[in-house]
Amino acid sequence: MMSKAWLSLGANLGDPSAQLAEAVRRIDAHKDITVTAQSSVLATKPWGKTDQPDFANMAIAVETSLQPIELLDVILGIERDMGRVRDEVWGPRLIDIDIIAYDRIEMISPRLTLPHPYAHERSFVLDPLRQIDEDVANWVMETAAKSL
């Protein structure tokens, strides 16, 4: 059975647009994931830690046979393989991939909260998501805001 998920991607080191394209290619190349839609790439100011380069951000929709934690493991592996090092919260990064929503499931676990708990506060997540699925963006806004 296939599920739908919506991912947010961002980068602000190296060649961000090329890294986003490579991340999308790697996600789509996974045997259990198909990219079904993608937003344009938006230039955005840093959030949280502002003394760093601007970001390139986008969103994609995927169909997958993976469960949410399995999908998380795949995207964390793609980040790692692309050189992502997690040494500073909200710091600069070669690539960042987050699961924003998965089949409109609401869940809280030690590794993953759905929808993404801060998506409703971040225009760099919501604006690209609105480009590919306005209904899901609205659901994320409503659901994430009430879950905090």
Image: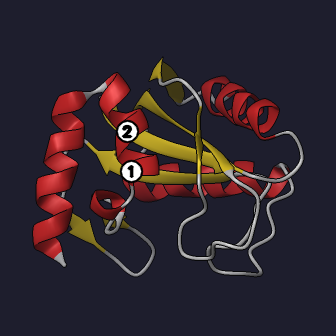
Closer to us: 33 or 140 = 140
Percent coordinates x, y for residue 125 in the rendering: 42, 48
The disc labelled 1 sits on which kind of residue? Answer: Ser
Q: Is residue 44 above or below residue 69?
A: above
Q: Is residue 88 left or right of residue 57?
A: right
Closer to us: 53 or 142 = 53
Q: Is residue 81 left or right of residue 117?
A: right
| Quadrant placement of the N terminus | top left
Determine contact: label 1, label 2, CB under 8 Å.
yes
The disc labelled 2 sits on which kind of residue? Answer: Asp
Percent coordinates x, y for residue 76 in the rendering: 65, 58
Residue drawn 49% across the image and 45% down it: 8
Closer to us: 130 or 139 = 130
- Crowd tier of the residue under label 2, counting other residues whose Cα lies within 10 Å: few below 14, some 14–19, many 20 or above: some
Q: Is residue 46 above or below residue 66?
A: below
Q: Is residue 142 left or right of residue 50?
A: left
Residue drawn 89% across the image and 47% down it: 14
Percent coordinates x, y for residue 131 in the rendering: 36, 25
Q: Quadrant of residue 143?
A: bottom left
Q: CA distance from mark 1 to mark 2?
A: 5 Å
Percent coordinates x, y for residue 88 in the rendering: 72, 81
Secondary structure beneath label 1: helix
**Res 45 visible:** yes
Residue drawn 81% across the image and 31% down it: 18
Residue drawn 16% across the image and 32% down it: 135
User: Mark 1 highlights which residue?
Assistant: 123
**Res 65 visible:** no
